[in-house]
Image (spheres, rainbow, N blue to C red):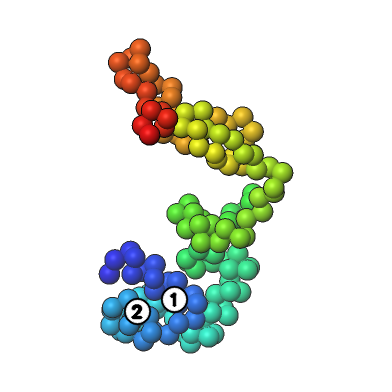
Amino acid sequence: MTEDQERQIRGLRMQGTGYKAIASATGLSRDIVRNYCKSHSLEGLASEFTMNMKEQIEKGLACAGCGRPLEQPRTGRRRRFCSDQCRRHWWAAHPEQSTHSAEATYHGTCAYCGQPFQSYRNQTRKYCSHECYIRDRFCRPENGVPRLRQEETT
């Protein structure tokens, strides 16, 4: 079983999908899916599991990204995700949940390629990407490396 299939099983199970439907979606047998779910605490009726998982996520007992059980620290900020990877995947899938304010979003033009870009909470940003920064800073004619600006390539 691949990581992609595991992720797909977790996602479908958290949505309340049954073992048979998950098996047909992933191309695995129903027994493999059921055994995986039992060994990762994803068993039970699909509708009951979905309600139970939502409650666990709201209480902070399960990861909001994958549904794995979480251990909360005794002091400090409560955890919402089990890993950075889960956090990144979840925020990429739920951009509407972000609380970025419009006042903290700045618009600029890249000093190297001339493309417009947006920057969040960084008013002094000059480049649209790290690649443009490296090319502008280190790829100079005096170093024997010609500069490639967008105007020259078009």
Q: Given the image, on which type of amino acid does mark 2 rest?
A: Ala
Q: Is residue 50 left or right of residue 144?
A: right
Q: Are marks 1 and 2 in contact (CB under 8 Å)?
A: yes
Where in the figure is residue 136, as x and y percent of width and height?
A: 43, 24
Q: Looking at the image, which residue is at 58% across and 42% down?
A: 118
Q: Looking at the image, which residue is at 62% across and 55% down?
A: 98
Q: Is residue 47 above or below residue 141?
A: below
Q: CA distance from mark 1 to mark 2?
A: 9 Å
The image quarter containing residue 131 is top left
Residue nearer the viewer, 122 or 28: 122
Dividing the image into 4 quarters, which one contains the C terminus?
top left
Q: Given the image, on which type of amino acid does mark 1 rest?
A: Leu
The image quarter containing residue 56 is bottom right
Q: Which residue is mark 1?
A: 12
Foreground disc of the pair 1, 2:
2
Q: Looking at the image, which residue is at 61% across and 42% down?
A: 120
Q: Which residue is mark 2?
A: 25
Residue 137's label in the rendered image is none
Is there any visible trace of residue 80 in the rendered image? no
